[in-house]
Amino acid sequence: MVKAVSEENFPVTFLNHTPVMHLPARVSVTEGVAFKEKCQQLLNSSSLPAKIVLDCSKTIFIDSSGIGALARTFRNTQQKKVQLVLKGVTPQVMTVLELTSLDRVLTLEPVAKVATSATNYSEKQLPTTHPSMDSWIKRCFDIVGSLVGLAITAILFIPIVIAIKLDSPGPIFFGQTRCGLMAKNFTIWKFRSMCLDAEAQKSSVTNQAIGAIFKNDNDPRVTKVGRFLRRTSLDELPQFWNVLQGDMSLVGTRPPTPDEVEYYEVPEWRRLDVKPGMTGEWQVNGRSSIKDFEDIIKLDLQYQHNWSLVYDLKLIFKTIMILFNEKSGAV
C-alpha cells in the first residue's frame, strides 16, 4: 500500500503559462506516485501546456521508484506531444540519470558548475537505495563467490561447449539486455540453450505467464542440450562474470528485461532498488512454476524486507539443495 502524499509537497507555479512543478528533497515510491499523478492531471487539463518543467533544485535523493515515475511521466508527455524539462538538477540526481542513461533522453536545463571539492565527490555517489547496497561484506562475498564460480565454469567449459556445438549450430554464449540496479541496462551472459533464431520466433510461442513476463513450459525454441543445461542451471554459470563485474550479486532480485520494465507501475520499480541476483526468493520458491508477475514482485520485495548477510547465505544453501531438482527450471 502506497501512502498518499499531500499536494503541498508538489507546489505548481506558472511561468508564462508553463507549469513548473517543484519536487521535494526525496523522491521515492510515495512521492513518485504523487508527482506522476500530478503531471497526469496537467496533461488531462482542458488547456494542454506546451511543456512541463520539473524543478529538481531541492531534490537530493531519488531511488528506483522516482526514476520509474520520471520514465512513465516522460512517456505520457511524449504521447501528448508535450515537452518535459528538468531544471536545477542536483549532482545527486544527475548521477542517477547518467547511470540509467535518462540524461540522454530527458531535456535538462544546464546548471552552473561549482568548483570541485571533496563535497562534490560525495554528492556524485549513487544513493543508498537499500542497506545491501552499502554492505562491503556482501560485495566481498560476491567477488570471492564469483571467482570460485568462474573456476568451476572453467572446469566444465569444454564438455558444455562440445555438447552445445553437437546439438545446435551457433554461438556458445547468449547475451541478453537486462535491467539492474536503478534500471541500468547490462548484458547478462548464459550458455546458449535455445536455437539460433530464438528471438525471432518468440512471437510464435504462447506466453503461459500472467503480466509483464514471458514463460512457456515446453518452449519449442529450447534445444535438447539446452533443456538439460536449464534443468541443472548450468546455463547460468557465465553469470558469475556479471557478478564479478558488479552488475549482479550472488543473491538478489530477478533481473528483468527492458520489455518487462516498460509495463511497471511506479511501486513495482522498487524491486530495482537492489542488484539482481543469480539466485533469490524466486529461485528457491519454484522459479518456473511462478507464472504471475505479481508473485515475482512480492518475492522480490520480500527479499528486500528480510535481507541480511545471514539471509543471503540461507538462500544460497537452499539453491544448492534444489539445484538438481528435476522440477526446477530456467529463469
Image (tube, rainbow, N blue to C red):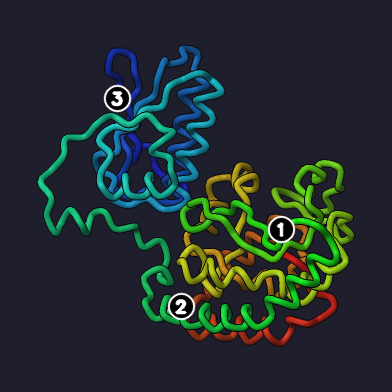
Residue at numbered disc 3: 13
Q: Earlier in the sequence, mark 1 or mark 2?
A: 2
Image position of 47 with respect to 35: above or below = above
Q: Position of residue 186 (x, y in %)?
A: 53, 54
Q: Name the quadrant of the N terminus.
A: bottom right
Q: Amino acid at mark 3?
A: Thr
Question: Residue at (74%, 74%) from the top-left corner?
Answer: 160
Q: Position of residue 77 (x, y in %)?
A: 49, 25
- Quadrant of residue 114 within the rendered picture: top left
Name the mark nearer the viewer: 2 or 3.
Answer: 2
Q: Decide if residue 298 is on the left or right side of residue 242.
A: right
| Amino acid marked by disc 1 | Pro
Q: Residues within 10 Å of mark 3 (few under 14, many from 20)?
A: few
Residue matched to label 2: 143
* CA distance for labels 1 and 2: 27 Å
Numbered badge on residue 171: 1
Position of residue 108 measured from the top left corner of the image (x, y, whole percent): 32, 31
Q: Is residue 162 above or below residue 271?
A: below
Marks 1 and 3: which is nearer the front? 1
